[in-house]
Each structure stands twice: as structure tokens, then as C-alpha cells.
Amino acid sequence: MKNRIFVSVFSLLLAALSVFTLAMPKKDFSDNENRTLAKFPELTFENVKDGGFTLGFSEWLSDHFIWRDAWVSVKAAVSVAAGRRENGGVYLTKDGSFVDGFSDEDAEFFETNVNALKSFCETVKSGYNIDVISIIAPTATVVYEEKLPQFAVTADSDALFEKLGEIPGFVDLRSAMEQNSGEYIYYRTDHHWTYKGAYFAYEQYEKAIGRTPLNENVFAIETVSDEFFGTLYSRFGLFMNKNADTLCAPAKTALGEMKVTNSKGETCDSIYSEDALGKKDKYLYFLGGNDSLIKIETGSATGKKLLLIKDSYANSFLPYLIPDSSEIYVVDMRYYTGAVTELIEEAGITDVLVLYNLKSFASDRYFRFINE
Amino acid sequence: MVFSSLEFLFLFLPLVALLYFIFPVKLRNGLLLCASLFFYAWGEPVYLFVMLGSIVMNYVFGLLIGKASTPGRKKAALAVGVAGNVLLLGAFKYTGFFAENLSALTGLTLPIKEIALPIGISFFTFQAMSYIIDVYRGNAQAQKNPLDFGLYISLFPQLIAGPIVRYSTVAGEIKERHIDFSLAADGIKRFVTGLAKKALLANSAGLVWDTLTKNGAETSAVSAWTAALMFSFQIYFDFSGYSDMAIGLGRIFGFHFEENFNYPYVSRSVTEFWRRWHISLGTWFREYLYIPLGGNRKGTGKQIRNILIVWLLTGLWHGASWNFVLWGAYYGVLLLLEKLFLKKFTEKLPVFLRHILTLLAVLFGWVLFAFDDIMLVPKFIGSMIGLNGLSDAYSPQLAASNAALTVILALASLPLGKILSERFKEKIGEKSALFGIAETAWFIILFILSVAFIVEGTYNPFIYFRF
């Protein structure tokens, strides 16, 4: 009798999971994991012969397995219970927030990029008499080092910032961020800074160019989503952790009218992408993601024509620059293939700002093309 | 197909089991044969023909040996049959290795073509040889039904990574076997235990080993020892987990395979270790090579020769690479030393010291085993004795994040669970509902956790698939 029950329980469990997996409708995209799921492999003779079909089938089955997110969470939870505080290069801190790991291996291009930036500053100074301002923002790993799990190994950020200090026009945000570390300056589930973190950076930037930053009230900060689960959440895989982030941004009305032209020549009237709020990665609300070159014509009459060379940290920083400049050219070195100096010349650039976060600056293999 | 995959657990197994139990007894062997061929073709669509060739060849030799009219002809048929199997294995497994070494020795440039190894060929070839030798010895009747013979060679539970089932042990069950709920329940428990060993323990340990050795063999002593320890755990849980799954599946379908592992890491001597590790391979070599060579009955000199032959071949069986030959030789010498001299000395040592010495010898063996590139072995041993520093920046993190895993791995390699469940059973009674519920819950938890690790797992190799 006992054996009969035992065998039945297991048979039912297997059968239920099998049938549910096959019967459930299939998704193309995993919101939680933030990636496209595998497609059913093609059934051709060649594909079967070289084993491609069975391999593809395994991936498909694993990606579309019933309650996949729950299984992934169970595994992450077991790892956490067994003392692991790191998964997929992401740390889980004591207060339940996620922090992106940053090790020496991530700093592969640091020296190269520092040198590239130095010579870029010289070129721009001698060629166009513009003082390049550079902000290499500390990430949460730097500001919250004491929150990281015990023994977590991170790159020596002090040494890196000392090197960065040699760059003319470098703005060190560390003390500003550390003073405000009690505030909500980084997302708990994403590797970016929040509107708040970006605002403190904006203050430092304005001071560096000798202007007075506008008060935060001027920007009429509003909440655009309170259900933001960022990329760190996806990578760690602990999906029952429901500590969602709130995504806030300066109100569209506070920024005035503008014309935004992307690299394909399409125009619109906002740097915000409302579409992104329906997606998983809501940080895409800012600029709709990354593009090689975006031109923004603002309503402000300062006459300042700013060239912004940047990574995604700058996307949520950009709104604060709108009242500051008449035209902003936003360049992403990962996609931009033209010569930066030509752009400076053609557009009649008056100011240059380089804005990256420390990790992406240290690991970006494309930044060095800034001089080409 | 591997057991620890979703397609096996949730498509192949339920379907085959369902059909098996609703099919009439007459058709069950045919069903299992078809299922086994599909199982093999899933991972090796082309090499299915190699296995079919082996089946046909050994079927024919079995009949020839069985029907031979004179002892001379019988012997000749056996010799040709064994040679055919050795050639088949040699062609697919050792061609590249021998060509490479011949080139190096003679300076000739032989065209070396890398041949991918058909999965499980070492296992099914050894099974086939056991069959023709058993028939020759009269321990088994030649199988007249080609489908039943095909089933013996290809039976999916033990096809790919053993245990190496000798024909004489299952000949009866191929013809007629009994299935019931108690056997199926035993089989499921055994299978789930093996699955958990593989998915939860072996893969976790293997990931640490891979991470620590991905940048070569030069690392701090802490990292090197952790790596070696993790490899020792990985290979044990990987291989014994596979054997558990094979034995469990066999039970579900009514077969009784012999045990393959018996808590090898509790051994007090290397001799004992090999009585507890990969038992079916040891038995095979003893039955079909060591004893025919004369074993220990023809004087110490011959015995030494026989042991060395057996162990060099055991090493080579594991792979066409010098490190495996060295690993085999290492055990051959160690076992000889133990037999001839060390035994008298070590038997006087305290028990815990004997455990530690044995584990160290085994751990060192795994270092030889782990590095396909034999030049890395001395570098790694250098790391273990601290030539590259005692610890490094990652050591504290390594220790902190793997402490719990190490304790679990160590406990799981002892017969502790077995002893505790026996006690529990005695105390509350095997028939009690509480025991039934606790046992069911335990296996469901193990199963659920294993599935979670498989769904998410990008890392799921089977070490013994290479052999």
C-alpha cells in the first residue's frame, strides 16, 4: 500500500509537470530574466544528423519549462541558504538590495581608456579651445562597499580614482555620493543610479563649469513607475524578492518643448519613451535606450551646444541638462562610428562632457575610438 | 540523452514507463529496445550505427562460439570476437592517441584525424566482451533472439556510463522479469537519490573546480587544495549518482544490476578503496583479464606482472591520454606496495590516520586524473605545496561561500544518511504512516530541488561520458 502511494505520487508529479509544460502557452520573452527565450528548433535532416536539433530542443524545453521563474528562484534561494551571496556576478547585500560586482577582471580597458581620454582632452583643448569635463561616476559597489557581503572581492576603486584624477577636467563625485549615501541614490534591483543620484551628479557638474545648479523643485520630479525590477534582479534570479524599485524622473512639462532626432533621422518631442513603461526594463524610459547619435534641440536660449559622450548612466542624467543647453549631441561610443572631432567641428560644439560609470568606463572596449 | 535533463525526466521517462506498464509482457522487450535506440540516437544520431554494428558482430560471434563443434574452433571464434571488439574500441578511442605518439616517436607526420568518441563505447564494448567470454566459458547460453541480445547491449539505463553489467547477471531477467510496486518504489528512490547527487552535489562541486582551474594550474595553496577536494567530490557524486540512477531505472523496469559504489571515501586503504569504487569495472578486469592471466596463483613475479597489466589497461580504459595511463600505473604500484610491504606497517596505525592517508592517496590520484594535459600536473602539485603562495585575495571569499557546500559534500559521501534512516525506521517502525510521509516528503524535496538546478543549470557535464 505504502509503495503504491509512493509510486503514484511520483508518477502524478512527473505527469503533471510534463503535461503542463506541453500544454501551457509559450512566451517569446522572459521579463524576469530580461532575455529572448529559445525558439523550437528546425526539424531538418542536417539539423538532426549533426545533433543541432536535440541541442536546440533541450534549450527550448528548459526555456519554456512550466513555472520556469519559480524553479530559477528556488535554485537562487538554495544557493543563498547555502551561504552564497553572489550569483551571476551580482551581490545580494544584507538589506536585500542587489549590487553589481566589480572586480579587476572588469577593469581590463581602464588604463587604455584613461590614456584615450587624456589625449582626447588635449586634442579638443588645442584644436577647439574647449575644456572637456569628465565624470566617471562611482557605482554602488564603490559607495556601498561596506554593505557588500563579507570577503567580496572588488577592484581597488581608490587606486582607480587616483588615476582618474590625472585627467584634466575630471569631476570626482565620490564625496557627494558618500555624503548622500543614506538617500535613495542607486536602484536596489538595477545597476543604474536613480533620479536622485543623477541630480547630485548634476549639482557637481554645474559647480565644475562655474554655474549654479537649479533647485530640484524646478524639475518637478514625478514617479513614472513603482514596479521597476532591474537587470541585477534578473541576473541574480531570486524572483520571489519583491523589493521593487521606484522610477522617478523630471516631469516632461518642466523640461519645456524640444525636438529629439535619433540616428535614423526620426524625430519626436520628448527624451522619454512611454513605451518602455510597459516593458520589463523600465530604465529604457530614458531616451528609449542607447543610440549612436541623438540630437536634442531644447527650448533654452543659453546658446550652449553640448557634446555628451556617454554610457547609459547619462540617460537619466540628461533631463537635468535640458535647461542648461540649447543643443545636445548625445554620442554612444559603442555604436558611433564617425570621428568625434568632425562632429565637434560640424555642429559648432561649445562644451564637451564625458559621462560614464566606473565599471563601464573600465570595461568598455570601444571608448578608445574617441580619438579616431 | 542524459538522465539529468528535462527531456529525459519529463518526456522520455514518463512515456516509456507508461507504455511499458500497459504493453503486454511479450512486447515489452521490443519497446525497451526501441526506446534504448532512440535514447542513444538522441545524443549520437550517427554513431547509432556503430552501436548497431557492435550488436550484430557480437550476436554472430555469440552464436558461432555457442555452436562451435571443437574446442579449437570455439577458441578461434572467441579470439576473433575479442579482437573485433578491441579493434572497434581502438579505432574510435585510441587512433588519434597512437598516431600522435607514433609521430612523436618516429618523427613521421602521420595524418591524424580527430575522431569524436561515440558515447558509452567503452561501456558497451566491455559488456559485449563479457557476453562472448561468458558464452565461451559456458556460464551463459548464446542468445538466439537478436532483439533480446540488442536489448542487453543497448538497455538505456546502463548504456552510457555503466554499471558494466555482465551478461550472466541479467540473462535471466532479459527473458523473464517481475515488476511490482515495491520494486518500482525502490527504483524511484534510488533514481532520485542519484539525480540529487548529480544535479545538486556534483555540479556544484564541479563549478568550483572549473572556476578555480580555468586560468591554469598555478594558483595559491588554498585554491589548489579546494580545487582538488572539489574535483574528488564531483567525480564521486557524478559517477555514483549516475550509477544510482541506472540501478534505480533498472528496478523500475524489473532489472537488478549489481552495485557499483559502496561509499569509497570511507576506505582505510587503497585496496579497500578499489573494492568500493567502480566495482563493476574492477570485477570485469578481475574476471576477464586478471584471473585468465593467472592472477596470484603463479607466484609473486607473475602476480606483479598481472597487476601492472590490469592497472595500465584500467588507466587507458578511462581515456586515450597519458595522464590516464599514469593514473592507472600509480594505482598499480600503490596496490602492489600495499599488498607486499605497506600493509604490515599501516595496519598498526590508528584508524583515523589510515583514513587520512588513503584519502590523500586518492586525492593525489584525482589530480593525475583531472588534467588531460599531463604537463599541468607538476605545476598543480607545486601550487598545492605552496610554491605560488599559501593564499590569495580570493581565499576568504572562497572559504566563506563554499564552507556549507563542503560540509554537505563531506557528509553526503559518508553512509550517514543510510544509518540515520535505518535508526529512524527502527524507532518509529517502517510500516507507520509517519515514516511513509517523511520518506515521501524527503524524496519529493530532493526531486524538486534537483529539477530546479537542472532547469537553471547551464553547467551539467557527465565526467564519465568521455570514457
Image (tube, rainbow, N blue to C red):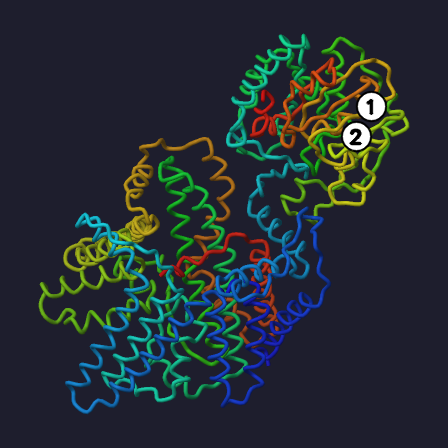
* Residue at x-position 38% and y-position 76%: B153
Residue B94, image quadrant: bottom left
Please, is residue B120 above or below residue B399 in the view? below
- Whether pointer 1 and pointer 2 mark residues with C-beta atoms closer than 8 Å, the reply is yes
Q: Amino acid at mark 1?
A: Glu
Quarter of the image where the C terminus of chain B is located: bottom left
Foreground of the two, B224 or A136: A136
Q: For numbered disc 1, what is the local secondary structure? A: strand
Q: Tell me which chain the residue with mark 1 is part of.
A: A
Other residues around mark 2 within 10 Å, as few (<14) / some (14–19) / many (≥20): some
Residue B271 screen position, x and y as percent: 25, 61
Q: Tell me which chain the residue with mark 2 is part of.
A: A
Q: Is residue A184 visible?
A: no
Foreground of the two, B271 or B53: B53
**Residue B267 disc label:** none
**Residue A261 disc label:** 2
Residue A346 falls left or right of residue B144:
right
Residue A245 screen position, x and y as percent: 76, 38
Residue A194, image quadrant: top right
Foreground of the two, B269 or A176: A176
Other residues around mark 1 within 10 Å, as few (<14) / some (14–19) / many (≥20): some
Please, is residue B5 above or below residue A164 in the view? below
Residue B420 falls left or right of residue A164:
left
**Residue at which label 1 appears:** A297
Residue A152, image quadrant: top right
Q: For numbered disc 2, what is the local secondary structure? A: strand
Q: Amino acid at mark 2?
A: Thr
